[in-house]
Every structure is written in structure tokens, then in C-alpha cells.
Amino acid sequence: MNSVIVKETFNASMEKVWEALTDPSKLKEWYFDIGEFRAEVGFEFTFMGQGTSGTPYKHLCQVTEVIPLKKLQYSWKYEGYPGNSLVTFELYEEDKQTHLTLTHLLLEPFPLDNPDLKFENFHEGWSQLIKQILRKFLTGEEV
């Protein structure tokens, strides 16, 4: 498996969903506290996350593509570990709902001997973030 795709539809405007993906104060509420963030190609940001064992990992990211209200893409690496991946959020609106497709594409493998960095873990993590946490943040709905 070299990619994870998670699709979800929200009863929210594209503007509201885009803001949730790009406004640092909103990101902090449902994603990670990344400090400063700008949806600009070349912008670099970091955030701390932890694996299933509780080990902290510093994520190193750089925005690679932005189409306002439609697409946000950034690289995703871990400080001190080999491997690289690409995270893409794509939005489109239909019938007053916003459809989001999240794709996490593995470009170079992360260490196979580290269970926290197994790429299969990303499906569960992204599914929970998008289908439960982001949904509740945007609409107040529980899944």
C-alpha cells in the first residue's frame, strides 16, 4: 500500500472547510497545533505528534501546491527518519455540501522496523481525523 485515500462529505460550505484546513487557530482545534501556517507554496511548518507507543515525532512539512478553496498539498516527513510522503486535500461543492478527498501518498518509505511509522497506520489516523474529528468541528455531528 503506498497511498491512503479518505473521502467525506460535510454539510458545510467550501469556505468553512477551507478555513478549517488553512487557519492556524482552526487547525489547532481539530488537527494539530502547528503554530504559524500559510497556504502558500514553499511555506514550511512543523508540528509534534505521537505514535501508538507515545513516542513523540516532529513532523516536517512544506506546502507544495495551493488552489484556494479547492486544493492544498504539502510534503510530510519525520525529523531524524528517512522517508517522505505527500498529503493532498481536495474540495468540491455539490448541492450545498462540500466533498473532501484526502490522499496521503508515500513517496519514499518510512522505516519498516518502526511500528509507529508503518504506512498502514495512516488509514486509521486520517479516517478518525476526517470522518470524526473534522466532522464534529465543522458540523457538530458525531459519528
Image: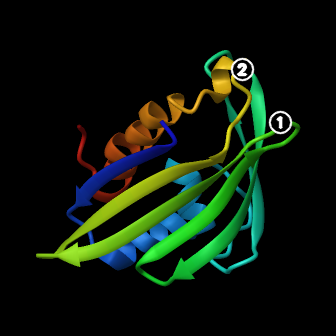
Residue 102 versus residue 106: which sits nearer the camera?
A: 106
Q: Whole-percent x and y of residue 2?
A: 52, 42
Q: Position of residue 111 (x, y in %)?
A: 74, 28
**Residue at the bottom extreme, as displayed:** 68
Label 1, secondary structure: give it: loop
In the picture, the disc for residue 62 is none
Quadrant containing the C terminus in the rendered view: top left
Left or right of 20 in this view: 23: right
Q: Is residue 120 above or below residue 113?
A: below
Counting residues from the start of the chain, the first of labels 1 and 2 encountered is 1
Q: What's the residue type where badge 2 is placed? A: Asn
Query: In the rendered view, does 2 fall on the left or right side of 56?
Result: left
Dot 2 lies on which element? loop
Q: Residue at x 33, y 62 (%)?
A: 100
Amino acid type of the residue tagged 1 in the rendering: Tyr
Pointer 2 local density, CA inside 10 Å: few below 14, some 14–19, many at least 20: few
How far apart are the two marked residues, 1 and 2, measured between alpha carbons?
10 Å
Spot occupied by residue 101 in the image (x, y as percentages of width and height): 35, 59
Residue 103 as seen in the image, left or right of residue 101: right
Which residue is disc 1 drawn over? 81
Question: Is 66 drawn above or below residue 136 in the view shown?
Answer: below
Which label was assigned to residue 114? 2
Question: 101 and 45: which one is in front?
Answer: 101
Mark 1: few, some, or many residues within 10 Å (few <14, many ≥20)? few
Q: Residue at x 75, y 76 (%)?
A: 42
**Image coords of residue 43 (percent x, y):** 75, 73
Image height of 17 relative to 80, above or below:
below
Q: Are marks 1 and 2 in contact (CB under 8 Å)?
A: yes
